Amino acid sequence: MSEFSLSRRLTAEALGTAMLVGTVVGSGIMADKLSDDVAVSLLGNTIPTGAILVVLITILGPISGAHFNPAVTFVFWMKRQLSVSEGISYIVAQILGGICGSLIAHVMFELPILQASTTVRTGGGQWVAEVVATFGLLASILAGIRFREAAVPWLVGLYITAAYWFTASTSFANPAVAISRAFTDTFAGIRPIDLPGFIFAEFIGAALALALFSWLLTSEKSTD
């Protein structure tokens, strides 16, 4: 049982996801303004995203668990660490917070507040990349909690920093972030029509990570 009320946990989830998406979208806009080189822009998008994850998980993790991600919430619900109602509430808070993050980024950069992305992100390679990205994210979280819980913020931040570059999709790995990025027609955007494939792949990756690591992290002593 958490020492924090559900309202505080939901606020932490909404705030954290808003700040995460605001960073993803805002750094993408800034990087795109500063360079015409896509590789340089991607680097300018990558580093702030990894850095803010370390900060957000460190400061908000003790309150809500710092999921900021429906796929993570799904896994912890499957592990029976959240009730159905708590899980649904977390996911709603994450999505609403993430959308607010996109809109606030537009305000900061004096862009039209309401947008819909036109950036095409679809196809088998993209979907496989999202399975891989989300699998690796959940693997980092589950194994990190098992072996070195204090390092989880760094594990997640460093993993996402790497996955931006080794996955074809630039590692969304998060249904709430994917939905939120459909609300921005900037560097980080994704067409709304492309969302179902991404979201499905992300939950598949999370489920695969849960299945494998539930077995992998079980020691011989705990099975005696």
Image: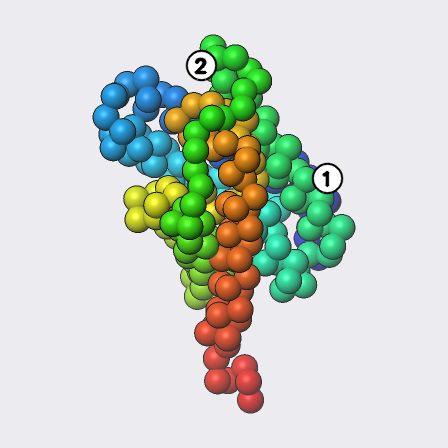
Residue 123: quadrant of the picture: top left
Query: Residue at label 1?
Result: 7
Left or right: 57 as drawn, with respect to 163: right
List x then y, in percent, for residue 91: 65, 44
Residue 69: quadrant of the picture: top right
- Identify the residue at image location x=50%, y=45%: 198
List x then y, in percent, for residue 25: 45, 27
Label 1 vs label 2: CA separation?
31 Å
The residue at the far top in this view is 110
Q: Earlier in the sequence, mark 1 or mark 2?
A: 1
> Which secondary structure, mark 1?
helix
> Which secondary structure, mark 2?
loop
Q: Nearer the viewer, mark 1 or mark 2?
A: 2
The residue at the far right in this view is 85
List x then y, in percent, for residue 111: 48, 12
- Contact between marks 1 and 2 (CB within 8 A): the answer is no
- Identify the residue at image location x=73%, y=56%: 83
Residue 45: quadrant of the picture: top left
Visible residue check, residue 208:
yes
- Identify the residue at image location x=50%, y=17%: 106
The residue at the far front in this view is 123
- How is colour applied across the structure in the image? rainbow
Left or right: 196 as drawn, with respect to 121: right
The amino acid type found where label 2 is placed reads Phe
> Which is more toward the observer, 124 or 177?
124
Identify the mark at residue 109; answer none if there is no mark. 2
| Quadrant of image for the N terminus | bottom right
The amino acid type found where label 1 is placed reads Ser
- Identify the residue at image location x=43%, y=23%: 186
